[in-house]
Structure formats: C-alpha cells, structure tokens
Amino acid sequence: MTSSPALPTLSRSPSERAGGLEGSGHSTVALVTLGCARNEVDSEELAGRLEAGGFHLVADPSEAETVVVNTCGFVESAKKDSIDTLLQAADLKGGRTRAVVAVGCLAERYGAELAESLPEADSVLGFDAYPDLADRLNALLAGETLPSHTPTDRRRLLPVTPVSRGAARAHVVVPGHAAPDLPDAVAPASGPRPVRRRLDGGPMAPLKLASGCDRRCTFCAIPSFRGAFVSRHRDELIAEAAWLADQGVRELFLVSENSTSYGKDLGDIRSLEALLPELAAVDGIDRVRVSYLQPAEMRPGLIEAITGTAGVASYFDLSFQHASPGILRRMRRFGDPDSFLSLLTDVRRQDPSAGVRSNVIVGFPGETESDFEVLCQFLEAARLDVTGVFGYSDEDGTEAASYDGKLDGDEIAARVSTLSALVDELTAQRAEERIGERVTVLVESVADGVEGRAEHQGPEVDGTTTLTGADPRVGGLVEAVVVDAAGADLVAEALG
C-alpha cells in the first residue's frame, strides 16, 4: 500500500475541553470526515445521533473504541483517500480501537463490494443506517456481524416530479434532513430540532440547503447515490442557523449539490431569494455565503439577492465545467462563452467587487485542441478569483464512461498542467486587481498572525487574507484595505 497522510483528528468538543471523558463507562467513538462540506454536515448529524445514543465522541481515533470514517466516493483520487484512511484506522485495532466502520458516499455507492474488497473494515453502512447508527455500533461492539449495505439507485426512491416529493420524503433517509426530538445539548430546545453536534469550533459552519440532484451530467455519478433533489424546509433551516449562532458560528456556508434549485420541490423556485435575508437576520450571524450555483439556472432576482442583501456575501460559486458548446452538450450541460460572460457582466454590474469561482474539467471525451483553446480563452476573459482544474476520468455508471473519443492519459495530464499554469497566473492577476479594495474579513485564526477570509473568499478553497494592524478575536469582523497579494491570498491593513 502506498503511504498516505496521518489519520485526521477531530476538533475537541466543549465537554472534552472541560475535562475529558475518561471513566465515563460509555463507548467512545471518533468520526473522521473526508470530502466536501456536505459530508461535514452529515458527520455532525451522525455525531448528534451517536451522542444522543449514549456514545462519547473523542478527537483522536486511537483513543476510540469505534472509528467511523465518513468516506467520499466522488472521483478516483477521493476513493483512494477514503480507502487509505480506512486502512489506517484498521491499523489502530489491537490497541483501544475495536471496530472500524465505513459510512458516507463510498460506502453508499459500493456497499457489499467495498466490504468484500476491504475486509479490514468491520462494517460498511449506507445512508439508511444513519437513524439507528448508535444501535448498530453497539451491536458491532457486542460481537454481532452487521450485514453490508446493498446499493440502489436512490433517484428511484422519490417521485420524478419534484413537487410530488413532499409526502414521500418522510419515508426516505436523506442525510442532514432529519429533525426528531433530541436532548437540548444536541439540538435547539424549541421548533424544528436539527440532529447535529458540532465537531469544529470555528466561526464558520456549513448549513445544508438541500440534498441530491436532478441534473443528468454525463460525467457525474452523484445523483445515483445521493438521490433526487430534496430541499429542506425554511423553518428547519432558520432553527438550525439560530442554533449554530448560539454555538459561536458567525458565517453560514450554504451547501447542496445544486443551490440554484432550492425550493423547486417546495413549490417556489425563488425560495432562495426569500430565504437569504431571513438567514442573514438571524441574531449572531454576520455573513451568509451560498455555494454551488448552476449557471444555466441563474436568474436576475437571485443575482440581486446575493449582491444586494446586507449580510450576504457577494460570492458566486458558478459551476461552468467547460466553455466549448460542443463539449458542454456532450456533458449534458448548457452554455457557451458568450452566455457565461454575459452572466458575469450581470453580476459585476450589480457589484464590481463580487467574488467568482468555478471548476472546469479538462480532457473530456471528444475534447479537441480547439475546444481546449475555447476554454482557455474564456477563462482569460472571465477574470475569476479562483478556478479548480480537474482532469477527466471515467466514473462507474456514468454515460460518459461509454463515450468514444477518449483522450490519452498523458494528453489529459498535459492539458491539466497547461491550464493549471494559466489559472495560477490569472488568479494572481485577479488578486492584484484587488489591491486598494476595501474588504470585510472574518477572523478565523490569531495563533500565528491574524488570518481570515474576505467576502470573496470561500472556506478552504479560495485563499485567505492576512490582517495587519489589528488585534481582534476569532470570529470578529474587521474592515480593512488590501495592500498586497500572493496567488489567491491577500494582505490587508485594518482600518481604525
């Protein structure tokens, strides 16, 4: 097995910081989360369920009787990271650790196949196991053998018509959507009660708007294991936002597979425009940020709500994926350079300093040198703050895996390298354009200098801002002027 990074540890919980959990007599469990912010929310749901079920959560997997790995199954590199992490957790057995359990997207996607190929994992559980995970872990610790998850196409669990999903969703497990009664330490004491227990004490927290996706992009397998698109109800989101604020959160990072579709199954596709001001008005919340917007579903009212609502970050995470019309059609997506640039013009007309990021796929089947050049020229014209570049790879069960016109792996790698170098240059240029700009920075660390994020910088992927001339607390908002830039990172001098 190739070497891989050390097994991650969790941030310590308030109860652990207050004096630890030794001698409690309760089973200990560690949750290790891989993948996206949506998985982070799912892990915090599992943490809430396990704590309500009598388990104590610990930060260090080597100190846990059970290690639960919330896996990612999106692309090949993510699958490998998940398997390596499960193997590292299995290496802990023989000490305090007695069981290793795989949950999350990789477990949901492959189930029994994963269990057979990875006997080091004591159990592989799908999303349907989440409501009674505590009981299942207790059974595992008692010596029982748990049946491995049997995958199914989760798109078929709900009606095809979005507005018909309301009654049916009560019978389908959708991670991050449950709201039963739980102890006050785990969930709010009144109103809809999210099943959630924070695993990170930082001032930013993801808030799941919806789960699943109704789009049929030919390169993506996510809808098959995440299911059809399901929005969370407004009251549930407001209640969870208020609870997060009570936990010290100052920025809400709204996540889903497709945030522009929020509300279409609730009867109003403009629900997000109405929700954003309500979330921004929650006491204690200073900033709301929306992620993963589909360019083809953007609308003038949503642009106005994001750029013009106090407390909402003027930030556009637009999933372009490519710019060549022919490649986009093969991807079963919509758009072209002119329509994308028109969208960006509309955004910047309302807020010239708006942040824009995107991801693109290079080397899709049939991509010619001309298609690749169209993508490069679009990115040069788009002036994005950050662009993620990914090389195409076949994914099990996707339509694109059967396409002809596959590019050689060396050619894909060469195009990724070329575009990545171009993107690095464009990102640095865009950051330098912000010198002299006034920004509001959410402080996230004061350990080695004051560091945080401006409005145009999303968590973890869009760079950071280092503050000078300020001595704030974590979670504070600081007005500053940008004085320098390096790549996507900025240096800003605090005002006043």
Image: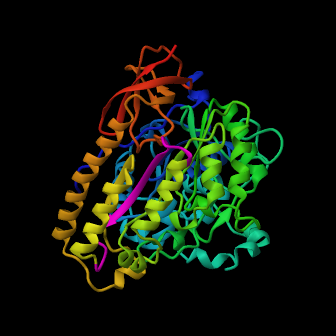
Residue 451 percent across, percent down from the top left: 42, 26
Q: Position of residue 176 (x, y in %)?
A: 64, 54
Indicate whether 316 appears above or below 148: above
> Seen from this angle, which residue lies furthest right?
190
Viewer-nearest residue: 194 or 113? 194
Question: Residue drawn 41% across and 82% down?
Answer: 399
Q: Give how far across and how far down residue 292 sits, in percent.
A: 52, 56
Q: Is residue 173 left or right of residue 61?
A: right
Nearest the viewer among 336 and 172 is 336
Task: Residue at 48% x, 61% y: name it.
Answer: 342
Q: If the image is split into quadrants, where does the N terminus sit?
A: bottom left
Whether residue 180 can be seen here: no
Residue located at (33% from left, 57% from top): 379
Which segment is the magenta one?
350-366
Inspect the magenta stretch and tell me whether residue 215 lies in it. no
Mark yes or no: residue 215 visible: yes
Q: Is residue 151 left or right of residue 183?
A: left
**What is the tally of numbered marks visible in this picture?**
0
Could you say which quadrant of the image residue 257 lies in? bottom right
Residue 354 is one of the magenta-drawn residues: yes
Q: What colour scheme was applied to this rendering of the protein?
A: rainbow
Image height of 466 relative to 147, above or below = above
Q: Is residue 474 above or below residue 349?
A: above
Identify the residue at image location x=59%, y=45%: 307
Q: Nearer the viewer, residue 73 or 355?
A: 355
Residue 430: x %, y % from top left? 35, 42
